[in-house]
Structure formats: C-alpha cells, structure tokens
Image (cartoon, rainbow, N blue to C red):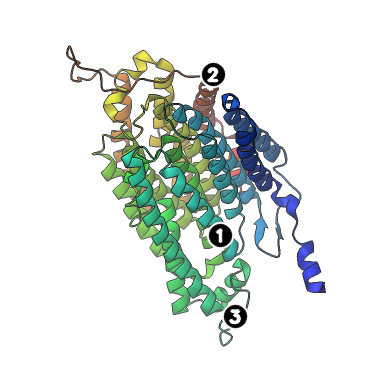
C-alpha cells in the first residue's frame, strides 16, 4: 500500500462520527427487530427507538466539549466545530421529538410504523453530517440523503390523496433545487480548478481550497454566478422567497410529525449550511451575498406574514409563518458578516423555534383525525375548556413564535434585532418589526379560537360532528409537551450557560 493511502486511511477517524454511526445502526436494528419479533410484540419497537435516541442524545450532550473540536477528519471531508456539535444535539433532539409525535400520529393510521422511525433516524444522521461537511462532495451526498428521506416521509400516509400530492410536489421542487445547487457547485469547481487563475487548486471542492481561490479572485464572474446558484439551492431548503411556493401544499399534505420535521430540523440544516458558506467559504464575496440575502429576507418576511393572514388550515398557516421565521434568520445571516453576535443569535433562535414549534405540533398531532391534512382553526374551538393542558401548551408555543415577552421566542428575536442594529441593517430591522406586528394577528387568532367562545354551526339532529376526536394525552406525550412549554418559559427569563455560550460566538 502506498504511503499516501496509508496516510489517508489514518485520517479516517470513525470514532469522531460515532453518534451518526450509532444512529444508523439503531435504525437498522429496528428493521431486524421487526423481522424476528412476533407481530404482537412490534408495539415495543417505537419505544426502543425513542429510548435509544434519548440515550445517544444524553451521551452527545455529556461529551459536548469533545477534545477533537476544531479539527478536520476524513482528509478534509469533515470539520468538527462547537457550532456543528450544537447542531448534532439539535438534530438528535428533533429526531426524538418527531418519533414521539410519530407514535401518536401512526396510531390513527393503518400504515407500516417501524419504517417511519427508521427513515427519521437516517435523515437525522445525514443532517448531523451535513452541518459538519467541509467538502462539496460530502455536502451534496448528505443533502440528497436528507431530501430522498423526506420524499418518502412526506408521502408516508399514502392512503391520503393530499399526502401523495404533497410527496409529488416535494419531489419536483426537491429535484429542481438539487439541480440548481449542483449547477452552482459545478461552476465553482470548474472556475476554481482553472490553472490560469491565481489560487486555483485541483481540490477546489474542499471548502478551504475554494475559500483561498475566492479570496484571490474576488470579482470573478463565473464564481459569482456559481455562488448565486448555490445560495438559490439552499434557499429552496429553508423556504425563502422566491423558492417557497412548495411549502403550503407540502406542509398540509405531509403527516403532522413530518411537517414538524420539515419546519424545524430541515430549516435548521439549511441555515447551518448557509452560515458555513457565508462565513467560511464565500466571505470574499460579501458584496454579492449581502444584497442577495437582504432582498430575500425582506421578501420572505413580508410574503410569509401576509400570506398567513388568510389561512384557516393550521398546517398551511404554520408553514407560511415558518417562511417568515426564515426571513428573520436571514437577517441574522446578513448581520453575521460584520457582527459575530449574529452567529450565536441564529443558533439561539433555532433552539427557541424548536421548543415552540414542537409544542404547537404536539397539540396539532393530538387534535388531528385520521384525515391528517384536514386541520382547521374551528377544530380548536373550546380547546382550553375541554383540554386545559393542551390549550396552555398551544398558547405558550404560539406566543413564543409570535415573539411575546417573556417567552423564549421574544429573546430569540431580540438578539437578532440587536445584531441587525449593530450591523446597521436599519431597513431590514424595520421590515422585521412590521412582520412581527402582522404575525401577532394570525397567531392570536389561533389562540382566540382555543380560548374564547366563537360561533360555530350547531350540530343538528341526525348530523355528525365533523371535528375529529381528540387523542388522549399519554404520559410520555404529556411529559414531553410540558417540558417544551416549561423550557420556553424558563429560557425567556434566563438564558444561562446556553445563552452565554451561543452569544459568545
């Protein structure tokens, strides 16, 4: 064996990605259990899946300050940082919460169950690798693994026409976004590998090599076009305007746990990647990325909030409100060019968004009927009276998403606004404030439906109540929802070590 191969093999430090490997092995183990366990014992498999993921999450948090942070492995394919470690915890926590919601949602359907948890874990492991990527090959492979997994998850309730329609629309939009992204990568690879230009390299797919080239050629036309295409491909994943058209239909048709997974984890993966690209790779082209992302942020905030005003289906409403949240996060990404505080603000906002969103989606999962896509505001009438616990969790989650003090979502928005103010982004800041004011209308309209009596058509004799029956809250679901609501309140008052660490970035 040649010395080069020996050296390359020595850098393949598999222990550094042991959480991802363990998650993949756990996913395979579930399929093995499904084959060998009697069918009457299959009900225990989702519990084992959740317990295994919680165990991995505890181990990852325990080893959060790992000694290998700040290093690269697998010959530059992966770069391990504190930020990527935070995102690994984020995705694993999201996977646990989606699995818990999946138990509730799948109980109402006659669908295979074990495969759902398997795919969720595989997608989560790919997300964990994506935010550690330091090379466009690994970046694209991890991204496509996520996308293919979501193709299946979005259309998982195949007996529902709306779920199948959502799967088809996500497939088309995902294929288009992947094509745009890949075209941008090819342009960057081609121009950075041109030996007649300064800083060129045969390893230009590596983020560090590409950064060196872009710094040596700060006004290259083909590089500029490639950067715009890459940003457009990422914009599809985060649902930013003008690449958000797929969101309402896909969010409505997808199973509610999958909608939560898309709204939180997929969006977070996109922003984790966007920060890597704008901070470490495309830094020399800030004169291009800042205007592009600024215009995108303004359009995203305005479209998301205004479009959500007219929605009565809560899945479409939460999807369009998620578009507006992507706009707020884009402001922080723009501010991060000159204000390091904005980087921590992005991660803090994502964490508060996770807490509030999964609290809301948890309530939605309990109220959804067999027709998961049919979830209207009128279904929440009298919720606070009939189910005070679910009503309280819903109000806390929506209040945090709206940015109402003293909830965690308020602090998340405040940190972004401070970063934008320090960066001098006054126009973006003004648009963001307008967006927050508009969002209060539809968020509180949802709370109003749950807490205040509104007129609804009476159920006449001989007719049936069209509202779906509400699922009883199990002990596991109750503890989960209570923990999310409590964390949202506590984090609003006291950010503690998490806030100090994130805002020191």
Farthest bottom residue? Answer: 196
Mark 1 is surrounded, within 10 Å at the Cα level, by few (under 14), some (14 to 19) or many (20 or more) other residues, namely: some
Give the camera-side residue of 126 and 423. Answer: 126
Distance of mark 1 from mark 3, alpha carbons? Answer: 24 Å
Q: Nearer the viewer, mark 1 or mark 3?
A: 1
Q: Position of residue 141 (x, y in %)?
A: 56, 59
Q: Residue 298 appears at what percent x and percent y? A: 34, 54
- Image point (74%, 53%), residue name: 14
Check disc 3: other Cα within 10 Å, few if <14, some if 14-19, many if 20+.
many
- Contact, CB < 8 Å: mark 1 with mark 3? no
Q: Which residue is mark 3?
A: 200
* Mark seen at residue 141: 1
Residue at image position (43%, 32%) is: 361
Residue at the location (72% across, 41% down)? Answer: 63
**Mark closer to the chain start, 1 or 2:** 1
Element type at mark 3: loop
Mark 2 element type: helix
CA gap, disc 1 and disc 2: 39 Å
- The part of the image, by quadrant, that contains residue 80 is bottom right
Q: How far apart are the alpha carbons under marks 3 and 2?
A: 59 Å
Report x, y in % for residue 253: 35, 40
Q: In the structure shown, which secondary structural element does the residue marked by tag 1 occupy?
A: helix
Q: Reading the chain from its start, which is encountered first: label 1 or label 3? A: 1
Front residue of this view, candidates 344 and 307: 307
Above or below, comparing residue 76 to residue 356 in the picture: below
Residue 433 position in % (x across, y down): 35, 44
Image side of residue 195 versus residue 150, left or right = right
Mark 2 or mark 3, which is nearer the start of the sequence? 3
Residue indicated by mark 2: 475
Q: Can residue 465 be seen?
A: yes
């Amino acid at each position: 064996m040649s010395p080069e191969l020996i050296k390359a093999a020595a850098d393949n430090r598999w222990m550094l990605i042991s959480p991802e490997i363990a998650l993949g092995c756990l996913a395979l183990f579930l399929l093995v259990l499904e084959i060998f366990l009697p069918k009457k014992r299959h009900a225990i498999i989702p519990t084992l899946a959740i317990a295994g993921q919680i165990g991995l999450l505890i181990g990852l948090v325990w080893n959060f300050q790992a000694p290998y942070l700040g290093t690269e492995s697998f010959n530059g394919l992966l770069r391990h940082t504190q930020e990527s470690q935070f995102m690994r915890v984020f995705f694993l926590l999201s996977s646990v919460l989606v699995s818990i919601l999946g138990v509730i949602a799948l109980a109402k359907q006659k669908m295979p169950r074990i495969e759902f948890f398997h795919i969720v874990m595989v997608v989560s492991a790919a997300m964990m690798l994506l935010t550690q990527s330091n090379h466009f090959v690994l970046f694209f492979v991890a991204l496509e693994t996520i996308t293919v997994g979501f193709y299946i998850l979005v259309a998982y309730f195949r007996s529902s026409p709306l779920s199948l329609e959502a799967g088809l629309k996500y497939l088309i939009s995902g294929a288009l976004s992947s094509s745009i992204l890949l075209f941008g990568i090819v342009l960057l690879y081609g121009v950075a590998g041109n030996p007649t230009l300064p800083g060129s390299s045969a390893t230009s797919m590596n983020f560090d090599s590409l950064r060196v080239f872009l710094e040596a050629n700060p006004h290259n036309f083909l590089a500029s076009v490639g950067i715009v295409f890459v940003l457009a491909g990422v914009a599809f994943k985060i649902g930013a305007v003008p690449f958000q058209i797929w969101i309402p239909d896909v969010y409505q048709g997808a199973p509610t746990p999958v909608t939560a997974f898309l709204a939180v984890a997929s969006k977070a993966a996109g922003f984790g990647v966007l920060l890597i690209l704008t901070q470490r790779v495309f830094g020399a082209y800030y004169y291009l990325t800042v205007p592009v992302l600024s215009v995108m942020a303004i359009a995203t905030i305005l479209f998301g909030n205004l479009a959500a005003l007219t929605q009565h289906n809560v899945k479409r409403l939460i999807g369009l409100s998620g578009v507006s949240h992507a706009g707020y996060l884009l402001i922080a990404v723009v501010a991060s060019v000159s204000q390091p505080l904005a980087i921590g603000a992005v991660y803090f906002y994502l964490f508060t968004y996770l807490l509030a969103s999964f609290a809301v989606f948890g309530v939605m999962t309990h109220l959804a009927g067999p027709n998961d896509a049919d979830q209207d505001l009128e279904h929440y009438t009298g919720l606070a009276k009939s189910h005070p616990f679910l009503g309280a969790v819903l109000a806390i989650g929506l209040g945090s998403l709206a940015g109402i003090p003293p909830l965690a979502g308020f602090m998340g928005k405040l940190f972004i606004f401070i970063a934008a103010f320090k960066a001098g982004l006054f126009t973006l800041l003004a648009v963001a404030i307008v967006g927050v004011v508009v969002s209060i209308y539809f968020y509180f309209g949802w709370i109003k439906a749950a807490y205040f009596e509104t007129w609804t058509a009476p159920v006449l004799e001989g007719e049936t109540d069209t509202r779906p029956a509400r699922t009883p809250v199990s002990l596991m679901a109750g503890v989960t929802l209570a923990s999310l609501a409590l964390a949202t309140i506590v984090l609003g008052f006291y950010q503690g070590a998490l806030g100090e660490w994130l805002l020191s970035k």
